[in-house]
Image (tube, rainbow, N blue to C red):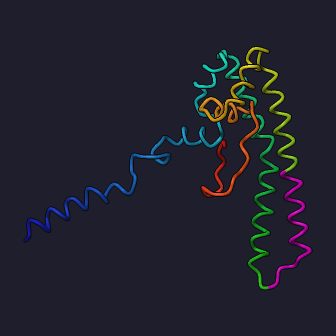
Amino acid sequence: MRWKLLVVMTLGAAVFGQGFGAGYGPRAQAPRQRMARVAGMRSMDSLKAALSLSDVQVQQLRDLRREQFQAARPSLEQMREKRRTLGELMRSENPDPGQVGQLMVESKKLRDSVKTAGADYRAKAQSLLTPDQKTKLMEMEKAGRSGAMRQAAAAGLLAPPERRAGRMGRQSYR
């Protein structure tokens, strides 16, 4: 009986001692890789192959995307603050409809400004492409879901996918 208990305890220590999912998934990646994924700067190998991009073009796209994120940061922080304020207001006993409406309108204006800036950056990113590469990009977009298409959106060459209900609000291509 003791040896069974010893075996169970040893196996339990081996399994639970490492933590759930240790070594797997995004948390197992190096912090620098996680930040690159978050910033939309994943590997662009599929996109590079699909559009025949040069290393210089890839670096220009990365630099432009980094610039876009830096420019959008203040607006995104304001949106986060308004969302937090709205949440606090809605948790109160009697939320003021005027304040709620005002926060919603201000949030929409910020979202629209970020979306407009994204379209401007998308035009700049597409201007880095040759006419042949632009044609390939449009064909790839028409073809639908692919790794290169996701990388094109991450690089700012295509509009990000529309949010759909489900899957905890994640974006995905149809």
Q: Does the magenta stretch include residue 99?
A: yes
Please tell me whether residue 54 is drawn above or below residue 9 in the rendered image: above
Q: Residue at 55% across / 42% down in the picture?
A: 34
Please tell me whether residue 133 is drawn above or below residue 87 in the rendered image: above
Q: Position of residue 101 (x, y in %)?
A: 89, 69
Please tell me whether residue 94 is drawn above or below residue 171 in the rendered image: below
The quarter of the rendered structure image containing the C terminus is top right
Q: Give the range drawn in magenta.
A: 94-111
Q: How many marks?
A: 0
Q: Does the magenta stretch include residue 8?
A: no
In this view, the residue in front, 71 or 166, is 166
**Quadrant in the picture for residue 57:** top right
Q: Position of residue 4 (x, y in %)?
A: 11, 66
- Helix, strand or loop for the magenta stretch, by majority: helix
Q: Does residue 135 appear to the left or right of 104 in the view shown?
A: left
Q: Does residue 173 appear to the left or right of 116 in the view shown?
A: left
Q: Residue at 78% across / 20% down in the picture?
A: 128
In this view, the residue in front, 76 or 52, is 52
The quarter of the rendered structure image containing the N terminus is bottom left
In this view, the residue in front, 94 or 46, is 46
Q: Position of residue 140 (x, y in %)?
A: 68, 27
Q: Does residue 54 appear to the left or right of 45 in the view shown?
A: right
Q: Residue at 86% across / 34% down in the picture?
A: 120
Q: Residue at 58% across / 29% down in the picture?
A: 43
